[in-house]
Image (cartoon, grey):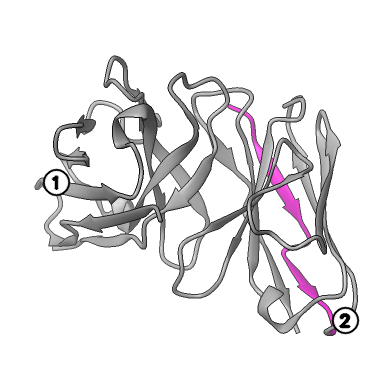
Amino acid sequence: QVQLVESGGGVVQPGRSLRLSCAASGLTFSTYAMHWVRQTPGKGLEWVALIPYDGSSKFYADSVRGRFTISRDNSKNTLYLQMNSLRAEDTAVYYCARDAEQWMVVAPYFDHWGQGTLVTVSS
Amino acid sequence: ETVMTQSPDTLSVSPGERATLSCRASQSVSSNLAWYQQKPGQAPRLLIYGASTRATGIPARFSGSGSGTEFTLTINSLQSEDFAVYYCQQYSNWPPLTFGGGTKVEI
């Protein structure tokens, strides 16, 4: 079955950087767009970024554009999120999620989620 | 940005009863709406997509309806495992993809 396993979370000071990874198995990773979605403690869900199956384009939430970079390595079945200039408001559980449709991203929603990795930005 | 508003924030229901959850979009999203269930300490799980299509393995007691700006998730004959937080998400007008604030279904 599909498994998505995030790693790389932790405690980091404001202004510093962190890179999250999401290892995928049980799916043809290279044929699906992938997303990062975050959830602040006790709060709701916020979509962060999307990368199509081939990495040809990238989409970001306004709150992270210019600071975060989504990327993927299809040879390693791995999704990444490079987070720079971190702020206290970036504190959240970060989930990677698979887009429900193969190939083209037309109407993106999420059919598989990882268990998440907690990022805490604090001095 | 399309703002998604869910109501109520919390819904108190007895096991075996019906729960009706609402989701409103600030502009039309056609039928491009998904519902997710999240239990404490777990990732969200896809329940409904296309406003009314159940995802794989989702019991028939879950049903979705609506189009445009008004949507409803109905859970018939609530089971103990259904007590959770439910989120709607629009995928018509993106980026960004946007979620509602969630409805907690409690006993």
Label 2 is found on which chain of the structure?
Answer: B
Relative depth, front residue between A52 and A58: A52
Question: Judging from the image, what secondary structure is the residue with disc 2 in?
Answer: loop
The residue sitting at the right extreme is B17
Q: Residue at x 76, y 79 (%)?
A: B79
Q: Is residue B47 left or right of residue B68?
A: left
Q: Is residue B104 left or right of residue A12?
A: right
Dots 1 and 2: beta carbons under 8 Å?
no
- Which residues are the magenta region? B1-14
Please tell me whether mark 1 or mark 2 is closer to you in this view. Answer: 2
Expressed as whole percent of the image width and height from the top left, the position of residue A78 reads 20, 42
Q: x, y (%) of residue B18?
A: 89, 70
Q: Which residue is mark 2?
A: B16
Report crowding for label 2: few under 14, some 14 to 19, many 20 or more residues within 10 A (C-alpha).
few
Determine which quarter of the picture holds residue B24. Answer: top right
In this orientation, which residue lies closer to the viewer: B9 or B23?
B23
Is residue A75 in the magenta section? no
Q: Is residue B4 above or below residue B20?
A: above
Residue tagged by mark 1? Answer: A19
Q: Chain of mark 1?
A: A
Residue at 65% from the left image edge and 49% from the top image edge: B55
* Callout 1 amino acid: Arg
Residue A88's quadrant in the figure? bottom left
Location of residue A103 by image quarter? top left
